Image (cartoon, grey):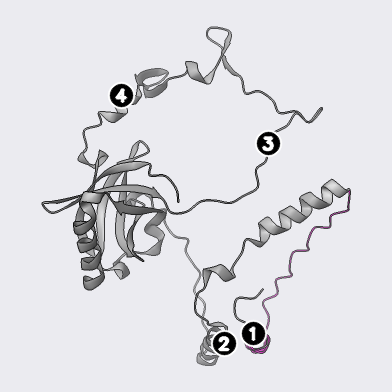
Amino acid sequence: MARAFWKGVISFGMVAIPVRMSLATEKKTPGFHLLHKKCLTRPKQVLYCAADDEYFSIKETVRGYEYTKDQFVVLTENDFEKVPVRTSHAIDILTFVEEKEIPHLYFSDSHYLEPEELGAKPFRLLRETLLKTQRLGIAKVSFQRREHLACLRPLDGTMLLQTMHFADEILPAPVVPEASFTEKELDMATALVKVMAKPFKPEEYADEYQKGLEKVIEAKLKGQKITAPKAPKVEVGDIMAALRASISAASKEPAGVR
């Protein structure tokens, strides 16, 4: 389990629930390094100041906010800790909503919440209340030098805090051209969905790209030839024929197998 990176309270009306927060997900990708093409050695990152004509290390840098062209005000870690918002140490619940009210586009990263020893009872009470009312708590909390919009939801025996995008961070959706289809085409597409449907079991899905990349690396080490897969041909022909063929193929293999 990941270590807690934030500690504070859930502010629930006049109730304060001491909690800690940890990461709920992690990315698993192979690690690559930038190398000097000539000798395949890892270069040292160097910072250069043209004004002083000197090289310096990352330890000699500060964070500056450009308030006008080429004019900066420097902020220290102590300054960031002084930002006057209550959400620096509190998950401030603002309201409760039904999940269906929130477009999936708004959800971002997930974090586990767990109570400190003294907060176990009100933590479980809040969790059970969310389950009973079938609602999510909409809150604001600050970490990683910014304030996040977030929602609290029950998950197994604990609660999950999911950060969310603010409304002004959502980009406009593309305009999809109008197109008509027949009732028979809709029925056939619905039949295909039903044939392919099955309960969601996340353990059945794996990162095929990562597995393929490992094969490429192994082939490179052995000096073997690597052949890139061909892009599939995209042909929009007879939709009904394509749907019938898809239903026939899906009926012969377990859903989700590709």
- Label annotation for residue 51: none
Q: Is residue 92 visible?
A: no
Q: Position of residue 140 (x, y in %)?
A: 26, 48
Mark 1 or 3, nearer chain start: 3
Q: Quadrant of residue 73?
A: top left
Residue on which disc 3 sits: 33
In the rendered view, does 29 fall on the left or right side of 51? right
Confirm or deny contact between disc 1 and disc 2 (CB under 8 A).
Answer: yes
Membership of 221 in magenta stretch = no
Residue on which disc 2 sits: 195
* Numbered disc in front, either 1 or 4: 4
**In the rendered image, the vertical position of residue 67 relative to residue 220, given as above or below:** above
Residue, far bottom: 184
Confirm or deny contact between disc 4 and disc 2 (CB under 8 A).
Answer: no
What's the distance in space between the residues labelled 2 and 3, CA to CA? 45 Å
Residue on which disc 4 sits: 78
Q: Quadrant of residue 41?
A: top right
What's the distance in space between the residues labelled 4 and 3, CA to CA? 34 Å
Mark 2 or 3, nearer chain start: 3
Membership of 249 in magenta stretch = yes
Report crowding for label 2: few under 14, some 14 to 19, many 20 or more residues within 10 A (C-alpha).
Answer: some
Mark 4 or 2, nearer chain start: 4
